[in-house]
Amino acid sequence: MRTKCSLDTVLGMVRGKWKVLLLWELHERPRRFGELRRRVGGISEKVLSAQLRELEADGLCRRVEHPGAVPHVEYSLTGAGAELLEALVPITEWSLTHLPRG
């Protein structure tokens, strides 16, 4: 029973259209908000902001403010976020084998 509850919790952390895509975009390097918005086409600023806050609250990404003449914010994966993304790779491989393409 505990496994079922744990799995439900993890699936809740990545549930939705955008979270896995955001994790993927953060896997190479930290990215700014505007860059994420461009790279994940079709997401509104409001939704992107909410999804990033949820990923941060779940400990999957971190938000770092960089002060200076042109202050900016960058988002990056935490260790837990990187591990979760790595765990999702077999699901992607399964989908390539079993889901129709087109």
Image: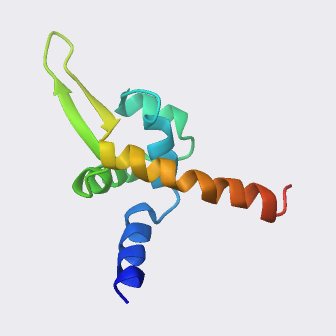
Please state the horizontal and vertical placement of residue 27, each as a whole percent of the image: 45, 35
Question: Image point 65% across, 54% down: which residue?
Answer: 92
Question: Image point 42% across, 74% down: which residue?
Answer: 7
- Where's the N terminus, which quadrant? bottom left
Please state the horizontal and vertical placement of residue 55, each as a whole percent of the image: 32, 53
Q: Quadrant of residue 8?
A: bottom left
Please state the horizontal and vertical placement of residue 63, each as a whole percent of the image: 23, 38
Question: Is residue 13 placed above or below 45 in the rendered structure?
Answer: below
**Direction from residue 76 to residue 43 in the image, left or right:** right
**Direction from residue 67 to residue 15 in the image, left or right:** right
Q: Quadrant of residue 19?
A: bottom left
Question: Image point 50% across, 54% down: which residue?
Answer: 87
Work out which residue is located at the far bottom of the displayed protein and give it. 1
Number of numbered discs on residues? 0
Residue 45 can be seen, yes or no: no
Residue 19 can be seen, yes or no: yes
From the viewer's side, name the closer residue of 51 and 77: 77
Q: Quadrant of residue 99?
A: bottom right
Question: Is residue 90 placed above or below 13 in the rendered structure?
Answer: above
Work out which residue is located at the far top of the displayed protein and give it. 69
- Where's the C terminus, which quadrant? bottom right
